[in-house]
Amino acid sequence: MESNALSSPLPTSLATALTGQVGVLPALGKQAQAAQLDSLDRHLLDLQALLHEQLADVEGLIQGTRGPTLAQRAGHHLLTAGGKRLRPLCTLLASRLGPAAKDSNGTTHARDLAVAVELVHAATLLHDDVVDLADTRRNQPTARVLHGNEISIFAGDWLLVEALRRICVTGIDGLVPQALATIEQMIFAEVEQAQRARTLAHDRAGYFRVIDGKTAALFRWAMRAGARAGHADTATEDALVAYGGALGLAFQLTDDALDFDGDSKKTGKPPLADLAEGKVTLPLILLIDAKPEYVKDIELLHAAGLDAQVRSEVPWREAQERVLAGLQSTGAIGEARRVAAGYAREAAAAVRDLPGHAPECAALIAVAETLAQRTS
Amino acid sequence: MESNALSSPLPTSLATALTGQVGVLPALGKQAQAAQLDSLDRHLLDLQALLHEQLADVEGLIQGTRGPTLAQRAGHHLLTAGGKRLRPLCTLLASRLGPAAKDSNGTTHARDLAVAVELVHAATLLHDDVVDLADTRRNQPTARVLHGNEISIFAGDWLLVEALRRICVTGIDGLVPQALATIEQMIFAEVEQAQRARTLAHDRAGYFRVIDGKTAALFRWAMRAGARAGHADTATEDALVAYGGALGLAFQLTDDALDFDGDSKKTGKPPLADLAEGKVTLPLILLIDAKPEYVKDIELLHAAGLDAQVRSEVPWREAQERVLAGLQSTGAIGEARRVAAGYAREAAAAVRDLPGHAPECAALIAVAETLAQRTS
C-alpha cells in the first residue's frame, strides 16, 4: 500500500493536498512525527489508500477541462498550476458516508461534483486576481498578467458555467440552487472584503463573516454535495456540512497566519501580501487590539501595496520588522493558530461519532488536524 | 386602448423598448408614418395592448431585484438606469404561442424567465464595462466608476447567479443547461472580440461569429425560454428560436451602425466608441474592403481610445471627418443597414406562417421591422 502511494501518478498527490508540499508521504510522516501524532500518521496512510483511485479520476477530469478558446486555456492554466484539491477531497470523502457510495451512479456523481467544486474555487481565484491586481499565484504569473484582465474575468465566468453544468448533469434535486446560494455567499463576502480593504477595517465580527462566506461556504457545499451523491441520511449530511464549515474556517485562519509565519517561496505569495491588499486578518486584529499604536505601521505597509520598489526601501522594511516583532511579542500569531486549531477540533468533533464509517471519519479528522498545523 | 397606453405606468414603456426613445406611442406613430408603414403602426398598438400587464409585472420584478450589499445595489443601479427590455419582450411574446400561455403556471414561468434573460444581459454589460474600461453607459456613470472594478465584477457575477436561480425555480426541463450553453457562447464571443480588438481584425466572418455569440445567442435563448414556458410545439419553438437568432443579428448590426450615424446624446455613447474599444464593425469592414487606405485613419482613431483630450485635438477630428466622409461616399453605413434589414426580414419570415396566433406573430414582425429602422 505504501509503495503504491509513494509511486503515485497523481500530478497533485494527496500529500500536496494536505500540506501544500510536493513529496508525498515521507513529508507527511515527518510532520506527523514532529508533532508526535502517530495516529494521525496512520490515518493519513489510510486516507491515501482509500481515495487513491477516485482522486486520480478527479485529477484526470480537472486536467481534461480544456478547450480551444483563450478563456478555456486561461482556466486550464490555473487549474493545472497546482492547488491542493482539498475541496474535491472533501466531496469524495463525504460521498463515502452514504449507502450509494459504491453504486456506479454514486461514484460518478461524487466525481463530477468533486470536479465542479474545484472549478468554482478556481473561478473565484481568477476574479480575485483581477480585483487584487495580483501578478503571481502559486509562484506562476496570473492569467491577468499573461492574457489581460478581460480574459481572467471571462475565464472565471466560463469556469463557473462549466461547474454548474457538471452539477446539472448529476440531476441531484436541489443541488444547483444550493450551489448558486453558495456562490452568492462567496460574492457577498468578496464584496465585503473589498469594502473593508478601503478602510483597513479590523473588527473581529466582520473578519469572521468574510472568511465564513468566502471560504467556509464552499467547504460546506463540497461536503453537502458529497453527502447527496452518496445518499447519506439527513443526520449524516448535517454532520458533514458542520464539518465543512468548521474546516473552512480552520483552513482560512491558517492560510491567513501563513502570511506572517509562512515561507513565501512555498506559499507562492510575497510577504504580508494580504495586508498589501487591505486584508486585516486575525493576527493583525489581535495585535491592534493589544497595541493600537501599531495601526500607523500597518497603514504604511498597506499603502505600499505590492510595489516592489517601495517594499525594498528602509521605511517599509522597518515597519515590517516592527509589526513582525509586535506579532511575536504579543503572541498574536500563536493565538490565531490556536483559534484555527479550535475550529479544526470542532470539525473533527462533528464527524467523530458518525456510525459505521470508521475509516472515512478517521480520514476527515486527520485532514482537519493536519490542515491546522500546516506551515506552508 | 391608446389613452391607456399613453398613461402607462411603466418606467420603461414599450415605445422605449422599441425605439430607445422616451415618449411612448406618438413617437412610434411618427416613425411609422414617416416610413409610411401604417400596418406597422397598427401592429405596435396591438403589441402594447397585448403585453401591457405582463411587461409591467416583469418591470416590477426587475425593479425589485435589490438587496443590501453593494454588489446588489450596483446590479440594481444598472437594471434601473434604463434599457430597452427587448429580451424580456421576446420571451413574453414567445410564451404566448403555446397552449399554456394562459395557465397561471405558464404566465408565471414566462415572467420569471423574462426577468432572468434581462439579468443575464445586465451581467454581461457589467463585465463588459470592466473589460472596456467604460466610464458611461446609458448616459450614466458605470458601476466601475461609481464603485470600482471589483464591485462591477462581483455585481455581474451576482446577477448571473440570480438569473440562474430564477430559471431553476421554473423547473422546466433542460432550460438551465441551455442557459449555461448560451452564457458560454456569450463568453467565447466576448473573448474573441477582445482578441480581435488587439489587432483591429476586420474580417467579415469573424465579425459575424462575434455578434452571433455575444448578441444573437441570448435572443435565441429568450425565445426558446418563452416557447418552453408556453408549451409550444417543437415546430413553433424552432421557428421562434430562428426568429431570435435573426433578430439578434439585426439588432446588433443596427446598434453597430448607430456608432456612426446615431445621435450620441440618445445612444448614451461617445462617437466612434466601438472603434475606440477596438471593435471594427460592419460599416468599417465594408469601408476597408472598398478603400484599404482608410486603415491608417482607423488605427489613429483606435489608438486614441476614449481619451477626451486626444479626441478634441485636430488629428483625431480630421481622421474622424475623413472616415465619416469615406463611410458616406462608399455607402458603407447604408449597406450595413441593408444587411440588418435583411436579417429583420429573415426574422419576420420565420414566424409569418405560424398558425393560430395572428396578433403575436404580427407583433413579432413589427418588433423586427421597427428595430432595424431605429435611429437611436
Image (cartoon, coloured by chain):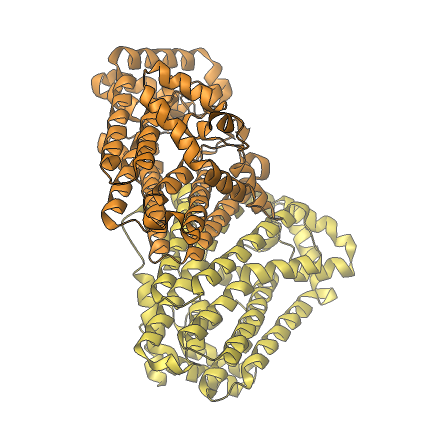
Chain colours: A orange, B yellow
Tell me which residue sits at (54%, 27%) in the image: A7
**Residue A260 figure quarter:** top left
Looking at the picture, tell me which residue is in the foreground, A91 or A9: A9
- Position of A318 with respect to A153 (left or right) is left
- In the image, residue A322 lies at what x, y percent? 34, 11
- Position of A22 with respect to A375 (left or right) is right
Tell me which residue sits at (45%, 23%) in the image: A25
**Residue B247 figure quarter:** bottom right
Q: Is residue A34 visible?
A: yes
- In the image, residue A109 lies at what x, y percent? 42, 51
Looking at the picture, tell me which residue is in the foreground, B10 or B194: B194
- In the image, residue A136 lies at what x, y percent? 51, 29
Which quadrant of the figure contains the C terminus of chain A?
A: top left
**Residue B170 figure quarter:** bottom left
Q: How many marks can you see?
A: 0
- In the image, residue A192 lies at what x, y percent? 32, 39
Tell me which residue sits at (56%, 38%) in the image: A77
Q: Is residue A203 visible?
A: no
Is the residue A360 above or below the residue A267 in the image? Answer: below
Looking at the picture, tell me which residue is in the foreground, A128 or A233: A233
Is the residue A62 above or below the residue B224 in the image? Answer: above
- Position of A149 with respect to A318 (left or right) is right
